Image (cartoon, rainbow, N blue to C red):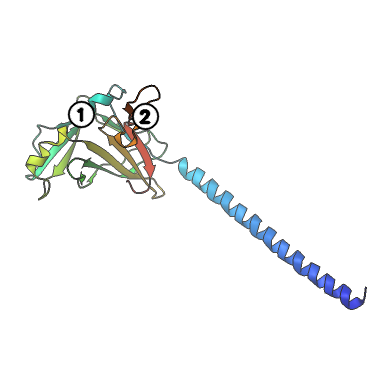
Amino acid sequence: MTAVNFLSDWNAWTAIGTILMALATFVVVRQGRRHREDDERRHQDEFRPLCALMPFDGVDPQYRRDTLLAISDQQAPNQGFGIIEIRCALRNIGLGPALNVRIMFRFLDMQGYLTCPWELSPLRPGEHRGSETDAIRIPVQFENHFNQSDFSQIIGKQWEIILTYDDIFEDHFYSIHRKRPLQLEKLYGAATTAEFVAPPQPWVTFGRGQFP
């Protein structure tokens, strides 16, 4: 092997070694970044709030969820408003405080009308609002496409109660409570009969980000 060939091979192997070292460094840096991101996410999850409306006896009435919502006979603070009474306790069952707590009502068979969010005070971990003797009362404003007559019919409608809230890191979360006891959009055939079955609808589902 001539000196020229030796130098040429050496340079080639050096170049390959340099590329491999660069790739290894990239992989190590990327893994380190991923580990730091995972650690940061775990740290934030340790302070995640979870807000839910809980029936007073702790049992989901399922086919009587309509009893959890009522139109209050209490006088609204201003004309052009009605008051919805929630017969549940609002509790933060998470490990961190819930900030910027807001509540909305969506009526699926009223063209999915969504009420304007009503702001509630922050909830510490384990803190709750509402009791059997002091129900949660939320004002709802009447508008051109949601008037007092519409409001008077809401108890018989298919409603959803939506809570949105933030953690101390300004991440957004939501909880959705549904009157409908079954997931009718997920019908499946029963194994032993020709009938279709709908799976049960959880009373509350939790999520991160913008609510659907």
- In the picture as drawn, the residue positioned furthest to the front comes out as 194
Which residue is nearer to you in this view: 58 or 15? Answer: 15
- Which residue is outermost to the right? 1
For label 1, the residue is 66
Query: Please, what secondary structure does the residue beneath circle 1 have?
Result: helix
CA neighbours of label 2 inside 10 A, class few (<14), some (14 to 19), many (20+) = few
69 lies above or below 117: above
Mark 1: few/some/many CA within 10 Å (<14, 14-19, 20+): some
Where does the image place residue 37, in percent across and percent down from the top left? 53, 50
- Left or right: 128, with 34 as reference point: left
Tell me which residue sits at (38%, 42%) in the image: 207
- Which amino acid lies under the numbered mark 2 shown in the image of this protein? Gly
Q: In which quarter of the image is residue 153?
A: top left
Residue at image mark 2: 189
Q: Which residue is drawn at 31% across and 31% down?
A: 203
Residue at 39% in and 39% down = 49
Measured as percent of width and height from the top left, residue 156 is found at 15, 32
Residue 190 or residue 13, whichever sits in front: 190
Residue drawn at (57%, 51%), measured in percent from left and top?
Answer: 34
Amino acid of disc 1: Asp
Residue 210 place in picture, x, y as percent = 34, 49
| Number of numbered tags placed on the structure image | 2
